[in-house]
Image: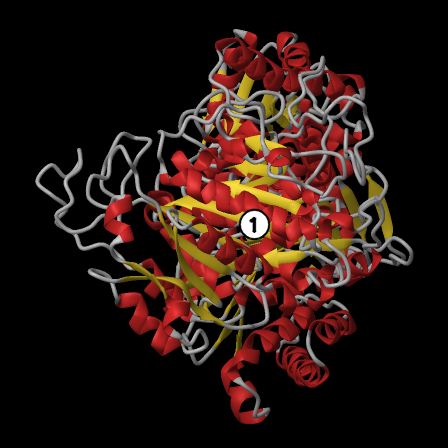
């Protein structure tokens, strides 16, 4: 039995008190414990993170981990998963990390339907660099880099994921841990690319999108009888942002993963194939 | 009269036949010379053999150094007159030697050739009774046309056809950054002996369009031939500006389209068939290559077209083209022909690369094509991601998970990979990156060669971390060093860079089939299924060698954590000053141990060619090796001895070995395809020693051997 305590590391947590990351961390650990009760083995789990406050997640969960560079969570996670599909690979990224620096990888990982999970800590601000705008900062949002207020409308990652043919598109809220935990469990269980954008209040630099602000607005899609299998319907919901903000699963479908289309490596993970011997004689012969 | 063969020093051979005397394997610069079109052009006179010989002798008298390839002379004579000519030549040579007061050395074959024979031939030629020609198994063919005409393919087919006849082949291509139109060409150099690069001149030009003739006619050596489509262009001495060339007009397109009713794309096959006929070579070899290259029906059409070309030449051109290819028996000694890219790919497959990920970028894309063609049989995943940043990070992910992983790119892509490269250094993730250089800066000349990125790959990415930089210099090294690269990467858990260039990776060469067991797979300190030690597993455990045990995710009993932030032994982020310094020490210590291992196992980190004592020592890295080895042959024929140090490992730099050679050298010359002589700067850095001379070329084109030999002579 793996417990929450087992998943702790000796590393002292340096997030600000009250940071939304705590909610995500707790939901993730609980999800792991829940999954490990059934089929998931601890050594199968690999977490990958980028750069930003979220990146420290690798320091705080005692499972295999790769704390990579800014914006590159998805290609790293992709490489790990393709090499060993027996691993449960979960990527953690920040909003700037994924939607700014790593934006190009976002659509591509989704359309490939790599069987990994991406959890974006979306606090709509660059925290670790002490407060600048990101691509999900709301219009007019004042930061150190936009002292007169952001003049660019935010991008809509949920809608992007949907039009990129995402097979599991969801939004969670760091202030609702049980709901998020459930999303994470479903996401990891999902066969294909699962994506959760998590609304995460930054208690130090985001004066606008606070716990209070979110609590007044968020509602769970599943409580409204939302049809998770209708992409157009999901798209419509993805645009909803203002007085009401939906959380939960927008869209979900089963589609062959990238690796499903590589039948020649289906038998075994690349990492478990014997590598000592290979006969290249036919290749040599073909060059004669 | 039976054929008598006289073998002279330096490989010269004389054949005495009933109707001809031919001397083969003569260095061009002594008797005839491919330099003559240039001399004549300079003097603005129409070429003929007399003026050429006069110029040539003048050049010899004035001790003007002429560069060029080897050539063969045949002096055609009728029956008994041969004796008269031999007698005349002998007297002439005798007198010449007398003048030099070395009578006693007349009979020395070398001197006979060096001093006596030249004026003899000159005499024959000047009196109008001689004719220059015949080469056997020494040929440079240039096939040119517009992009999309299958130039590269047909050049390769020709090269392979020659190789199957037991000949050595070097093939290189030249193309522009476009899909259709423009001008492409492929040079195939064929020889009895090993050839390491293209030559300076060509013997046979296969022109699939008019432009090719006009662009390359002056590269043809005297009496060279042109196969061309008579409907493209009308050629005569006036339009060509030369009288000596042999012209073989063929209605190439018309035959293919109207007579044979085949697709015009097969025009090149018709030209190949014609060339084989012209060279009196074995058509069945070409047919065999076509059969093995194409699907059955396509092969059949191509063979029909090739045969038609063959027949056309045999029927319409009875005067033989005096360059011949003779098949040799190669049973059991078959060679293979492949490009540098393919050799790298083959090496990677043999090294059990399991994950190859690359974004297309000339000139490295050949590896991607090769790998994907063999993806299934070799049980790999080959992937084209959204860019080079993704490529390097995916490779890092796969390597972290425990698969042998590789990517390849060129300078621009490598710029994008730099941050990822540093991450693999920091996280001790073993990946192999091939960087095929092209002419920079920036996009530069996308399809041309360069060696401008040496300093860049050595220093790329911020901070100090260990890496290996290996620069293969030929096709064989591409294979073996790729295999080694994976071993160094895994054993030392570091990134390894294979630094190549366009000229190396896109040129093709016939080589002995690779020894499959020369390099064995070594995975280093790999913890496989389960970690059983009592002590907690530490991914970045500090050890004496700096190498930590390498578990991978899924290893039971181990939490495998790594971190691009500075970290402690367990991979947890740390900003502690002591840990920071210890970790930097640990990582860089691996490079010291790697250097020691290279030394202890006597790995060829450098290679040395030529005699120990020499007038000068050439030093280079990478693809300049081929032209240098060819230039050395030319210099040797002139009695100039140089030796050559090839630096194969640029990092860790083989200081001791380099010092050993350069320290004892009277004159050193760095030869590089760059402007700033980056190797010299490394030598200065490690040896505190300046290279005496730098011979540099940075116009996107590789050195030609004759040109290089001349530049070396100028310095001597």
State the count of labels.
1
Residue drawn at 51 percent across, 14 percent down: B580
Q: For the residue labelled by badge 1, is the local secondary structure a helix, a strand or a loop? A: helix
Chain for numbered disc 1: A
Q: Nearer the viewer, residue B74 or B420?
A: B420
Q: Nearer the viewer, residue A99 or A210?
A: A210
Q: Position of residue B46 (x, y in %)?
A: 40, 54
State whether residue B606 is above or below residue A207. above
Q: Nearer the viewer, residue A96 or B153?
A: A96
Q: Nearer the viewer, residue B167 or B699?
A: B699
Looking at the image, residue B593 sits to the left or right of residue B700; the answer is right
Q: Is residue B692 visible?
A: yes
State whether residue B671 is above or below residue B688. below
State whether residue A23 is above or below residue B610. below
Q: Position of residue B487 (x, y in %)?
A: 73, 34
Please say which color scheme the image uses.
Answer: secondary structure
Residue drawn at 75 percent across, 59 percent down: A287
Residue drawn at 32 percent across, 47 percent down: A100
Q: Is residue A72 visible?
A: no
Q: Position of residue B429 (x, y in %)?
A: 61, 34
State whether residue A255 is above or below residue A43. below
Looking at the image, residue A244 sits to the left or right of residue A24; the answer is left
What is the quadrant of the N terminus of chain B in the image?
bottom right
Q: Quadrant of residue B225?
A: bottom right
Q: Alpha-carbon neighbours of circle 1 within 10 Å: few (<14), some, or many (≥20)?
A: many
> Label 1, on which residue?
A31
Q: Position of residue A137 (x, y in %)?
A: 23, 48
Extreme residue toward the left, this view = A148
């Amino acid at each position: 039995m793996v417990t929450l305590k087992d998943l702790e590391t000796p590393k002292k947590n340096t997030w600000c008190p009250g940071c939304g990351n705590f909610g995500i961390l707790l939901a993730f650990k609980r999800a792991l414990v829940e999954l490990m009760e059934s089929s998931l083995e601890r050594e199968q789990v690999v977490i990958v993170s980028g750069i930003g406050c979220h990146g420290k997640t690798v320091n705080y969960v005692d499972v295999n981990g790769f704390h990579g560079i800014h914006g590159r969570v998805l290609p790293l996670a992709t490489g790990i998963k393709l090499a060993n599909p027996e691993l449960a690979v979960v990527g953690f990224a920040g909003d700037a990390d994924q939607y700014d620096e790593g934006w190009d990888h976002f659509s591509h990982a989704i359309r490939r339907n790599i069987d990994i999970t991406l959890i974006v800590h979306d606090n709509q601000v660059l925290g670790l660099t002490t407060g600048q705008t990101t691509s999900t900062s709301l219009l007019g949002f004042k930061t150190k880099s936009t002292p007169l207020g952001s003049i660019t409308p935010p991008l809509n990652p949920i809608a992007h994921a949907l039009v990129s043919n995402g097979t599991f598109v969801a939004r969670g809220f760091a202030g609702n841990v049980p709901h998020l935990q459930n999303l994470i469990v479903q996401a990891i269980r999902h066969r294909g690319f699962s994506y959760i954008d998590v609304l995460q209040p930054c208690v130090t630099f985001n004066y606008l999108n606070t716990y209070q602000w979110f609590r007044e607005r968020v509602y769970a899609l599943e409580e409204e009888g939302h049809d998770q299998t209708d992409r157009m319907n999901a798209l419509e919901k993805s645009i909803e942002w203002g007085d009401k903000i939906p959380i939960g699963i927008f869209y979900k479908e089963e589609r062959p993963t990238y690796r499903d289309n590589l039948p020649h490596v289906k038998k075994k993970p690349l990492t478990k194939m014997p590598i000592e011997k290979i006969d290249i004689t036919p290749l040599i012969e073909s060059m004669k | 009269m039976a054929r008598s063969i006289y073998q002279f020093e330096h490989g010269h051979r004389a054949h005495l036949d009933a109707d001809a005397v031919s001397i083969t394997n003569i260095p061009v610069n002594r008797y005839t010379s491919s330099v003559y079109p240039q001399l004549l052009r300079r003097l603005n006179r129409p070429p003929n053999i007399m003026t050429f010989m006069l110029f040539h002798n003048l050049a010899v008298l004035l001790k003007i150094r002429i560069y060029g390839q080897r050539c063969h002379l045949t002096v055609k004579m009728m029956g008994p007159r041969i004796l008269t000519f031999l007698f005349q030549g002998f007297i002439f040579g005798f007198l010449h030697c007398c003048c030099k007061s070395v009578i006693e050395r007349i009979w020395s074959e070398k001197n006979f050739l060096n001093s006596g024979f030249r004026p003899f031939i000159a005499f024959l030629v000047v009196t109008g009774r001689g004719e220059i020609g015949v080469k056997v198994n020494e040929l440079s063919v240039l096939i040119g046309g517009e992009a999309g005409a299958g130039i590269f393919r047909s050049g390769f087919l020709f090269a392979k056809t020659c190789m199957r006849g037991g000949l050595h082949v070097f093939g290189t291509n030249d193309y522009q950054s476009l899909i259709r139109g423009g001008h492409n060409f492929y040079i195939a150099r064929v020889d009895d002996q090993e050839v390491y690069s293209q030559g300076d001149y060509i013997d046979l030009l296969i022109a699939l369009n008019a432009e090719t003739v006009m662009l390359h006619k002056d590269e043809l050596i005297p009496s060279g031939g042109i196969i061309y489509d008579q409907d493209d262009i009308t050629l005569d001495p006036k339009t060509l500006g030369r009288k000596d060339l042999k012209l073989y007009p063929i209605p190439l397109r018309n035959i293919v389209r109207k007579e044979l009713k085949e697709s015009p794309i097969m025009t090149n096959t018709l030209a190949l068939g014609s060339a084989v006929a012209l060279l009196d070579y074995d058509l069945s070899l070409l047919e065999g290559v076509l059969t093995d290259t194409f699907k059955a029906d396509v092969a059949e059409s191509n063979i029909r077209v090739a045969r038609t070309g063959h027949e056309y030449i045999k029927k319409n051109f009875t005067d033989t083209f005096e360059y011949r290819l003779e098949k040799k028996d190669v049973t059991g000694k078959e060679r293979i022909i492949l490009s540098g890219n393919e050799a790298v790919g083959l090496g990677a497959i043999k090294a059990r690369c399991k994950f190859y990920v690359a974004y297309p970028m000339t000139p490295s894309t050949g590896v991607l094509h090769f790998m994907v063609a063999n993806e299934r049989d070799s049980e790999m995943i080959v992937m084209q991601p959204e860019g080079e940043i993704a490529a390097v990070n995916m490779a890092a992910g796969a390597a972290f998970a425990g698969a042998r992983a590789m990517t390849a790119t060129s300078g621009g892509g490598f710029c994008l990979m730099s941050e990822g490269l540093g991450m693999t250094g920091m996280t001790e993730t073993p990946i192999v990156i091939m960087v095929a250089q092209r002419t920079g800066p920036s996009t530069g000349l996308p399809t041309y060669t360069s060696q401008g990125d040496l300093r860049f790959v050595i220093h790329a990415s911020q901070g100090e971390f260990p890496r290996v930089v290996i620069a293969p210099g030929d096709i064989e090294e591409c294979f073996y060093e790729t295999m080694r690269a994976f071993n160094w990467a895994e054993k030392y858990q570091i990134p390894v860079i294979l630094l190549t260039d366009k000229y190396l990776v896109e040129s093709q060469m016939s080589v002995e089939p690779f020894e499959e067991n020369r390099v064995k797979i070594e995975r280093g300190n790999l913890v496989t299924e389960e970690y059983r030690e009592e002590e907690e597993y530490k991914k970045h455990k500090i050890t004496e060698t700096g190498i930590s045990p390498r578990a991978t995710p899924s290893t039971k009993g181990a939490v495998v954590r790594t971190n691009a932030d500075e970290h402690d032994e367990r991979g947890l982020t740390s900003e502690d000053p002591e840990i920071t310094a210890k970790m930097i020490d640990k990582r860089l210590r691996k490079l010291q141990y790697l250097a020691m291992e290279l030394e202890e196992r006597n790995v060829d980190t450098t290679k040395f060619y030529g005699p120990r004592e020499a007038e000068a020592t050439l030093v280079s890295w990478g693809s300049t090796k081929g032209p240098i080895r060819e230039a050395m042959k030319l210099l040797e024929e002139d009695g100039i001895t140089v030796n050559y140090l090839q630096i194969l490992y640029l990092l860790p730099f083989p200081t001791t070995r380099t010092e050993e050679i350069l320290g004892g050298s009277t004159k050193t010359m760095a030869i590089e395809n760059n402007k700033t002589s980056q190797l010299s700067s490394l030598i200065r850095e490690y040896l505190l020693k300046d290279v005496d001379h730098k011979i540099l070329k940075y116009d996107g084109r590789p050195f030609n051997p004759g040109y290089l030999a001349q530049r070396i002579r100028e310095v001597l």
